[in-house]
Amino acid sequence: MRAIFENIKHAFGALWGFRARGESFEVITPFPTSTDMYVSVFITVRDGRYVVTDGGWVDKGVYHCSLPTENNIYNRVFAFFEEDYCISRTTSADGFMYLYKSTRDERLIPNLVFDVAYFISAVVNTALVQYRDETVRDRFRTKAGTLIRRHVSADRLRFNAPVSPLAKAAHFGAVVTSLQGNSVSLVNFISGSNYENVRGSFAKSNFNYDLLERTSASRLVRDKILLIDDRHIAAKELSPFIEMSKEKNQSPLMWSTGQEELLERLA
């Protein structure tokens, strides 16, 4: 039995990886995600404290998963894991959320690595669950996000995020930075199972675009795109909202016909 135990310990240990990343060290862990990836955490020293973070990878979509933050059930599950593992969060200057734990005791670093890695695995895997009360809008956001993620690199892409710290109040379904890095294209996802829900989705989108226009960050915007789920609502019912969005210099694209144009605009 001891030989079996030693074999298990050796095999598990061999799954861990380690490499330098500037002033930080990346630890590649054997904790898996349901997106066929393994969790990495990053260790750095700040003001005499050892900080173990996710590197912003969860928020940046590196694990090929966007968190369904509009789903109340998921938010409760996320909060449970966050509290259970004593995870803290902060927002970087470019608007990304970082999840972390810190300590002054070097001996506790392995504990923090375990907690942060397990937390990342749990929240990513839980995000892929189809919740019983998931709305049509939630499902459409997931489908649209998957399409965009397949064609836009993670370092250029943020979901449910502001354009910049200059306009923190206005959040958009997807924020895509141009290849030159000097402008962004915004995508809001419009969906709903009935007329009232679709109208509310348009209203929320317009509110965020209007908030953005009141800030200097609006100068960074190249494209204001509305990606509309037209599978549940008749075209004539969408028509007034589409005309209004055009008057506001927004670009409405239908899911059934506009996917190719969407990807061209985001290239």
Image: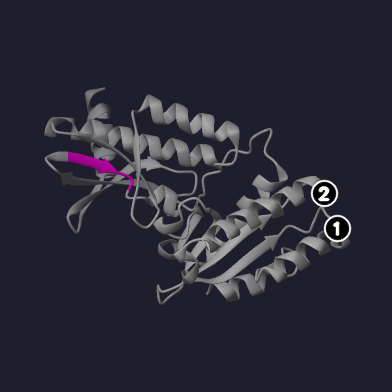
Q: Residue at x 52, y 45 (%)?
A: 67
Give the magenta range.
50-54
Between residue 204 and residue 87, name the one nearer to us.
204
- Visible in this render: residue 85? yes
Mark 1: which secondary structure? helix
Q: Position of residue 180 (x, y in %)?
A: 40, 77
**First in residue order: circle 1 vs circle 2:** 2
User: Image quarter for residue 20?
Assistant: bottom left
Q: Residue at x 60, y 38 (%)?
A: 71
> Which quadrant of the figure contains the N terminus?
top left
Q: Residue at x 11, y 40 (%)?
A: 48
User: Image quarter for residue 102?
Assistant: top left
Q: Which amino acid type corresponds to the residue marked 1 in the rendered image?
A: Glu
Q: Position of residue 58 (x, y in %)?
A: 42, 48
Q: Can you say whether 59 is above or below 174 in the image?
A: above
Between residue 243 and residue 32, name the one nearer to us.
243
Q: Position of residue 167 (x, y in %)?
A: 46, 56
| Pointer 1 residue | 237
Left or right: 91 with respect to 267? left
| Pointer 2 residue | 195
Q: Which amino acid type corresponds to the residue marked 2 in the rendered image?
A: Tyr
Between residue 90 and residue 55, name the one nearer to us.
90
The reply to whether dot 1 and dot 2 touch (C-beta < 8 Å) is: yes
